[in-house]
Image (cartoon, grey):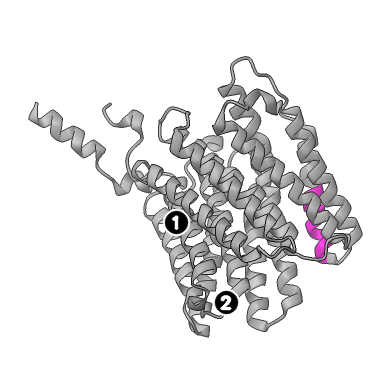
Amino acid sequence: MVESSLAEKQALAPQWAAFLSLGFRPLYVVGCTWAVVSIFLWIYTPQWLTGVLAGMLWHAHEMLWGFVATIAVGFLFTASANWTGTNPLHGRPLGGLTLLWIFARIGFLLPGALAFSIASLCELLFFGIAALALGQVIYRKSSSQRNYGIPLLVLGLGVADGLFLWFTQQGDYVWLMESYRAGLLCMAVIALLIARRVIPFFAMRAVQGLSIPMLTGSGQWQLAAGIFAIALLLAGWMTAAAIALAIAGLLALWQLFSWKPWAVRRVPILWILYVGYAGLGIGLLVAAAYSMGWITRAAWPMHTIGVAGFSVLIIGMVTRTALGHLGRPLRTDRSMVIAYVLVITAALLRIAALLPTPYVLELLHGSAAVWILAFALYLWRFFPMLIRPRADQLFR
């Protein structure tokens, strides 16, 4: 009896082996922690941002590459293990990759060219190793041909990141922004690709009798439109780029309508993904309007895609995929639904802060406060699970 009790306690205890068993575990933890810390620093203590990458540039960089792209890499590591039957990175190599990410975050906060150079190297190694690890498992499987573009997209994220950091050091603001837009759209293509596959699958598993199309054909057109948009923007062909962005955005909204959103209205773990996908589609249309010159502030497409799109999708994905891969029931509790509502509220307040009103500062602070609360709530709920073995393996 004593031995059984001791075994149960040991099984329930945090384990490094469990924490580093799949990519989503450490990368969801550090990514969501950074979502809290970076927004706190940017809104409430900007005077602490004294590195070469400072001010607005630091904020833009850390939101895209430090937060959004990190969560995406964590998801792709885990998803590719399912697609191929081979875990791309785990144990000490995964721990080393996570340390590279941490060194990059610290280095970008420290003053001086040396800290910036070390941080940049760690950052580029992070995306390079991630792309290589994904490529090694995906390209070995002929049955995974539809995923062949994913390692290249992750590599593209890293290239755009490197260009952004290079032009920051050179003081070339024009090409710096072009690099940022390329990275933002590369991340958007990855998000569209992932969400278009998983949302119908998740919905049909969760809602009994629901049948919705996977829309593979429109997805291929959407993927092509997104890739063309990146190339056209870098070439300076703004009108053609706007058309490609509009096509990708309209296809996203059409796909969403085809997925019968009314059928999932009572399932929070699904409707949050629908809301995020809608935000991403609308964001691409806003980006098209910006490319046409109809909107003059770059903050509009950046925050519509980034906050209303990426962030809402992320809070849904980091709960749904974590529950599934931790052997937990695929049901939300009150804390998860509150986190969903808080992230949506943060997005609405942040977009409202772009309007020319006397309440811009109040809206910014309100958005930051509910954002911080949302991701802190996620960490409070999920961190204890992420550092322990799967629930369905505890007492086997």
**Residue 186 vertical placement versus 382 (above, below):** below
Please provide percent x and percent y for residue 372: 49, 55
**Magenta part of the chain:** 225-234
Q: In what element is the residue under mark 2?
A: loop
User: Is 42 left or right of 305, judged from the image as shown?
Assistant: left
Residue wearing tag 1 = 33
Please tell me whether residue 228 belongs to the stretch shown in magenta: yes
Closer to us: 339 or 116? 339
Which quadrant of the figure contains the C terminus?
top left
Between the residue at mark 1 and the residue at mark 2, the CA separation in whole angstroms equals: 20 Å
Compared with 362, 215 (above or below) is above
**Looking at numbered disc 1 in the image, what kind of residue is underneath it?**
Thr
Give above or below for 92 relative to 6.
below
Residue at 90% of width from left, 56% of height from top?
A: 240
> Reading the chain from its start, which is encountered first: label 1 or label 2?
1
Residue 253 or residue 8, whichever sits in front: 253
- Magenta stretch: dominant secondary structure: helix
Quadrant assignment for the N terminus:
top left
Query: Could you say where residue 394 lies in the image, as x and y percent from the top left?
Result: 29, 31
| Residue at the limit of the structure toward the front, as seen here | 358
